[in-house]
Image: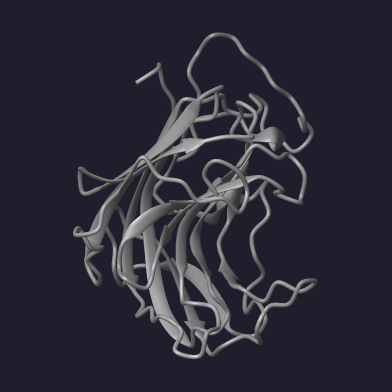
Amino acid sequence: MVLLNISCTKDSANSDVDNGEKKEFISSFESINDFSDFYITPQGHKGTTFHELSDLIVHSGTYAHKIWIDGANPPSTISINNNHRGYPTIQFQKTAQGTFKTPCYITLWVWLDMELQESITGGEDDWFSFATFTDDESDSWNRTVLVNLNPSGFVHLQHTSNQGEQTNIFQTTDLMFPQREWVELKMYLDFRDNGYAKVWQNGQLVSHANIGNITNKLSQAHFGLYCSPQLITGTVYNDDLIIKEVEEE
């Protein structure tokens, strides 16, 4: 099975080939080779986050990517990020065809078992992130756009008009994310001037926001488990990921 539809070579960093053809990346998480040229978070990150290819709960094929946490991390500080992390990155700038241009459609199937709570002490609420996107080609990931789940159970876009800013054109307040079943998340990213992003959950729009202060390229992304450090247990499976350049919506 061919799971990576774009050329991928380690010596092609910063390549940005544009031959007019739309680029596409596909992985059903059948093989770690799909991500062998990219950074993958270490096994047992901070002693609490673990991941593997698993045949226990699968959307299609033989395997899905399973990630789980077992214990809390210390609270994050200004200088230390202690968030739970378990994922492979996708680093398009390392591939022969280079970074993607938006607009892009991203489809991901997710099975999540994780209870999120609002803080009762005035600290950080629990949160879970399904996807992180950046135009930054460095290891800093300075400008990101996230698709998150809040403790009320709603999927929403994070870091919209700017890093750390939150503005919405539309945000669901009644369509909660169903847990312990396979859910299709479809995301549309437009990082051009006056750009925007949309997220659909099983075909229904749940979040729509303007995206600002970002260049028109999708350089890196990650999917899997990224969540607040105080969470002590939870499991997520990812399967059937598609990222593709498209014409304007």
Give the x, y percent position of residue 130. 44, 58
Could you tell me if residue 189 is visible in this image? no
* Apparent side of residue 124 relative to residue 189 in the rendered image (left or right): right
Q: Quadrant of the C terminus?
A: top left
Seen from the viewer's position, the closer of residues 229 and 18 is: 229
Seen from the viewer's position, the closer of residues 98 and 138 is: 138
Residue 179 falls in image quadrant: bottom left
Residue 154 falls in image quadrant: bottom left
Give the x, y percent position of residue 217. 61, 29
* Apparent side of residue 131 relative to residue 249 in the rendered image (left or right): right
Q: Is residue 127 above or below residue 11?
A: below
Q: Is residue 27 above or below residue 43?
A: above
* Apparent side of residue 17 relative to residue 198 in the rendered image (left or right): right
Could you tell me if residue 6 is visible in this image? yes
Seen from the viewer's position, the closer of residues 137 and 175 is: 175
| Point 54% across, 76% down: residue | 50
Q: Quadrant of the N terminus?
A: top left
Q: Is residue 145 above or below residue 219?
A: below
| Point 56% across, 50% down: residue | 165
Give the x, y percent position of residue 54. 40, 69
| Point 69% across, 34% down: residue | 93
* Apparent side of residue 82 relative to residue 189 in the rendered image (left or right): right
Seen from the viewer's position, the closer of residues 97 and 71 is: 71
- Count the numbered circles shown: 0
Give the x, y percent position of residue 125. 48, 77
| Point 59% across, 34% down: residue | 218
Q: Residue furthest top?
A: 20
